[in-house]
Amino acid sequence: MKVVLAERIGFCFGVKRAIDMAEEALKKYAPIYSLGSIIHNEQVVRDLSNKGLKVINGLSGIKKGAVIISSHGLSPDKVNKIKQRGLRIVDTTCPFVANAQGIARSLQRSGYKVIIVGDVKHPEVKALVDFASHKAAVIKDKREAVKLRIKKSDRVGILSQTTQSTANFLEVVKAVEEKKPRELKVVNTICKDAEERQEAARALTDNIDAMIIVGGKNSANTRRLYEVCVSRLKKSYLAQTELDLRKGWFKSISVVGITSGASTPDWVIKRVIQKLALYAKNR
Ligand code: F3S
């Protein structure tokens, strides 16, 4: 059984930057907290926790130290609350996410009805809504867009969660366009890494028999990659680590492809490759 890696694999720029910043901060400040997971990968979060990072879900009881804002960004209201408590902020918001936040804010301030294409429960999207003064509508897909109430007099501005698929984003744009609002402003805020990663995975599915998508179960871009792969190759499987692999998946498989979410460390990918090599050897 041959193993082929997708061209784009491992950490993206934003995740690597966030981890580097957290590692640096851990050397300088104590106590140090992260509001939610700094990135959506359990192994990385566990590693940082072992080095002293405390993951919290709220600020209650936190009186001193530093708070890390995750790569997904944070609502301006919450940032203010951290400041009001006199806590130090280590802001690891990915610059591409920060760009989307600025666009959400400026569209809302310019009088557009703001639509964000994304997952309403994801921390990045929650913060984007708050950057649009809590007034944005979040639309998951074309089906939801069709149901959206838009008046002919509306000026609509659409942007995207950075890790969405371009195809889904364009379908939503088309559905909104068909409602013929007075003005429609579309800003594609999908991050290049997410787009290129999906493209590389899509291209790989043409030449393999099964695909493993390695990544955190809460990672939006990992899920998106899985959706892209499984729509083209039924034998596509999600694995957080090598422990999720099942021997039965690889029965009569000659070539297996591997891709990973943007927050998956290289060492996790390496262990998946080693386990596959073991399966191949013991056939
Ligand atoms: Fe940033 Fe794109 Fe990664 S938005 S965190 S570089 S997937």
Image: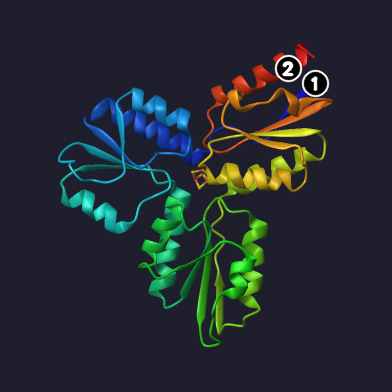
**Which amino acid is tagged 1?**
Met
Residue sitting at the far bottom = 153
Residue sitting at the far front = 248
Q: At 44% across and 64% down in the image, what residue appears?
A: 104
Label located before the other in sequence (2 or 1): 1
Q: Residue beneath label 1, please?
A: 1
For disc 2, the neighbor class at 10 Å (few under 14, some 14 to 19, many from 20) is: some
Q: Where is residue 248 in the image (x, y as percent from the top left)?
A: 75, 26
Mark 1 falls on what kind of element?
loop
Check contact, mark 2 vs mark 1: CB within 8 A. Answer: yes
271 left or right of 93 in image: right
Is 40 in front, or is 282?
282
Q: At 33% across and 23% down in the image, what residue appears?
A: 51
53 left or right of 233 in image: left
Q: Residue beneath label 2, please?
A: 279
Q: Where is residue 72 in the image (x, y as percent from the top left)?
A: 43, 47
Q: At 15% across and 41% down in the image, what residue appears?
A: 63
For disc 1, the neighbor class at 10 Å (few under 14, some 14 to 19, many from 20) is: some
